[in-house]
Image (cartoon, helix red, strand yellow):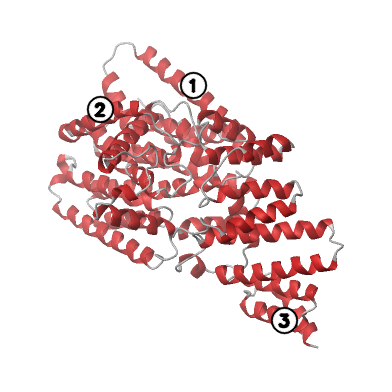
């Protein structure tokens, strides 16, 4: 008996997703990364596909399809925070529907009764509290968008097996390639897809040509590596991974920073322990996600127990070979990408809930199938249905409450610091939120009590607090120390320091500088910083600003050269091209 007609089931899932994530539409930009994305969009001029797909692109990671969606935020939504949040919710809604279709395709291939299973699995995916981080954080769109392509690829592969069509298999490989251009974790779908080709239903065993699809997978992987390798010198994600692998192969694991535990005298033991307990942690979070935490910096050694149990369970699932077990193995394969982060340190935290967004898809389908098979012949079906309804209701409450927490940076970072009191970057973000709420003294006290590695952007927040408090000399001194001291190891951090120095001097000018000598000194500083920024970023906008500063210094010839050069380099649709052209022409006379 059909639980709901497919059209009604889809409508219900749409209403459920929009209803529970309604608060997210009104959430602010997160002070961590989201504000930087928005600022970059507002300062970005022109549009070409080349700027996204060429080495260096528009991001420190090579994820061109992801950055194209941010381009859409700028062109269509004007970089407004509500539009950017709406995009995230829309992608999550799309993924909820794809999980519904994936479940249907899987049940159809294995001849299971899939109507109720599909609806329940999609509802669980929609409401799972662990997914709130990826949806609410605009920077978490990487996982959302990669998930879209992974789910599409699995649907295409199942269609290939069902129809015995190589075209669908090629499409599956191609779609995973697209997913990897949103986030590299999409590539971790390939082992699970090979498992589906190997452990296929009996009626598909005779189709030996299915193994050609593995060749398509190989082409997709090589294509991805060729694209990303071009961006090696610009891509901190690839660079960090290669560095770790090189050190590990050389036996120098001790040189790799231990992300979640203090290192001991046995680096390989530390590495194995961390992998095992983080695996156990993620396994528990998929089943019981509370308490949710945006700033996970530590994982208890108690999770070694579920980590060991997970290893045993995976062995059993592999040998027993059941439809539900295959999906759980696919989920684990996707989740292994998260284990790289604990050693490469290419993220805000070494462990994060958003990393489980994609694995949650096949996980909830597998769990739902197993649950349906276990309870199929149970007598008290009404009681079972009531328990499922209560579970879904509880998930609605928890997820909705978490979305409300994300509606304000203050409540989010208060919760993060409460969960991880020793995590300095979270305290740093909390200080910014306190200042934004007019609690300047609390913010200053908190920011002064913490120490953060000079290699992290959040370490600059102390200067931001000083600037907002109009303590310009202190803010400038702090930033100059950082600029000339150790820790400014990347162009990204150096550029951010220079931009903040410019903002400090601008604010001081707006307050008024009566001393002529001091005024000239500040302008000369700004000119030097703008020259360095232009060298780092190759952006004509900084050349344009050099022209204005030269004008204020009385250097008309230099100003004309800067404006003329900016005109050459600005794209035709840049709002700065016209003013720069007029100024260059006026100064030429």
> Mark 3 — residue?
558
Name the residue at 31% across, 24% down: 371
Distance in Å between CA atoms under marks 1 and 3: 66 Å
The mark total stands at 3
- Sequence order check, earlier mark of 2 and 3: 2
Badge 1: residue crowd in 10 Å (few <14, some 14–19, many ≥20): few
Query: Callout 2: helix, strand or loop?
Result: helix
47 and 162: which is toward the camera: 47
Name the residue at 26% across, 57% down: 217
31 and 495: which is toward the camera: 495
- Sequence order check, earlier mark of 2 and 1: 2
Name the residue at 28% across, 40% down: 265
Percent across and percent down for residue 140 are: 50, 45
> Mark 2 — residue?
309
Quarter the N terminus occupies: top left
Distance in Å between CA atoms under marks 2 and 3: 69 Å
Query: Callout 1: helix, strand or loop?
Result: helix
Distance in Å between CA atoms under marks 2 and 1: 27 Å
Quarter the C terminus occupies: bottom right
Q: Decide if residue 408 is in sight here.
A: no
Please indicate whether residue 199 sits to the left or right of residue 49 in the image: left
Badge 3: residue crowd in 10 Å (few <14, some 14–19, many ≥20): some
Residue lying farthest to the right in this orientation:
514
> Mark 1 — residue?
394
Q: Which mark is residue 185?
A: none
Please indicate whether residue 434 sits to the left or right of residue 212 in the image: right
Front disc: 2 or 3: 3
Marks 2 and 3 close (CB-CB < 8 Å) = no
């Amino acid at each position: 008996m059909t639980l709901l007609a497919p059209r009604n089931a889809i409508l219900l899932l749409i209403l459920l997703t929009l209803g529970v994530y309604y608060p997210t539409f009104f959430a602010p930009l997160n002070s961590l990364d989201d504000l930087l994305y928005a600022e970059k969009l507002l300062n970005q001029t022109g549009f070409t596909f080349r700027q996204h797909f060429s080495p260096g692109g528009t991001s420190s990671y090579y994820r061109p399809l992801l950055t194209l969606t941010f381009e859409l935020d700028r062109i269509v939504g004007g970089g407004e925070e509500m539009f950017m949040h709406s995009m995230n919710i829309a992608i999550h809604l799309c993924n909820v529907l794809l999980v519904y279709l994936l479940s249907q395709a899987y049940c159809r291939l294995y001849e299971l009764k899939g109507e109720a299973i599909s609806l329940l699995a999609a509802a669980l995916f929609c409401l799972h509290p662990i997914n709130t981080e990826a949806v609410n954080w605009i920077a978490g769109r990487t996982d959302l968008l990669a998930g879209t392509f992974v789910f599409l690829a699995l649907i295409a592969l199942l269609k290939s097996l069902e129809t015995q069509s190589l075209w669908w298999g090629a499409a599956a490989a191609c779609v995973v390639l697209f997913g990897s251009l949103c986030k590299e974790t999409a590539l971790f779908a390939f082992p699970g897809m090979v498992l589906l080709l190997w452990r296929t239903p009996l009626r598909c065993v005779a189709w030996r040509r299915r193994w050609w699809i593995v060749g398509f997978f190989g082409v997709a992987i090589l294509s991805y590596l060729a694209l990303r390798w071009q961006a090696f010198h610009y891509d901190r994600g690839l660079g960090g991974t290669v560095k770790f692998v090189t050190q590990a192969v050389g036996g120098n694991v001790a040189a790799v920073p231990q992300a979640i535990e203090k290192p001991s005298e046995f680096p390989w033991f530390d590495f194995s322990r961390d992998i095992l307990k983080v695996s156990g942690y993620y396994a528990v979070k998929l089943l019981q996600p509370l308490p949710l935490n945006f700033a996970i910096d530590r994982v208890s050694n108690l999770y070694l127990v579920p980590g060991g149990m997970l290893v045993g369970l995976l062995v059993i699932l592999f040998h027993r070979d059941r439809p539900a077990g295959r999906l759980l193995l696919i989920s684990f394969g996707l989740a292994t990408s998260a284990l790289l982060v604990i050693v490469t340190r290419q993220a805000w935290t070494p462990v994060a809930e958003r990393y489980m967004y994609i694995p949650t898809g096949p996980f909830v389908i597998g769990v739902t199938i197993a649950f349906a098979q276990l309870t199929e012949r149970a007598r008290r079906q009404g009681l079972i249905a009531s328990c499922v309804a209560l579970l879904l209701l509880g998930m609605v409450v928890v997820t909705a409450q978490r979305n409300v927490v994300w509606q304000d940076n203050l409540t989010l970072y208060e919760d993060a610091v409460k969960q991880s009191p020793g995590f300095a970057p979270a305290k740093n973000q909390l200080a910014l939120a306190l200042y934004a709420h007019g609690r300047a003294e609390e913010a200053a006290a908190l920011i002064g009590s913490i120490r953060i590695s000079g290699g992290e952007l959040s370490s600059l927040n102390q200067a931001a607090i000083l600037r907002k408090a109009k303590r310009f000399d202190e803010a400038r001194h702090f930033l100059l120390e950082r600029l000339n001291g150790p820790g400014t190891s990347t162009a990204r951090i150096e550029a951010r320091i220079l931009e903040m120095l410019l903002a400090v001097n601008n604010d001081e000018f707006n307050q008024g500088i009566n001393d002529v000598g001091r005024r000239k000194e500040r302008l000369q500083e700004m000119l030097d910083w703008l020259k360095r920024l232009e060298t780092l970023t190759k952006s004509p906008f900084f050349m344009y600003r050099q022209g204005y500063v030269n004008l204020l210094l009385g250097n008309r010839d230099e100003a004309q050269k800067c404006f003329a050069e900016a005109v050459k380099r600005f794209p035709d649709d840049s709002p700065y091209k016209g003013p720069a052209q007029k100024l260059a022409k006026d100064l030429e006379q």
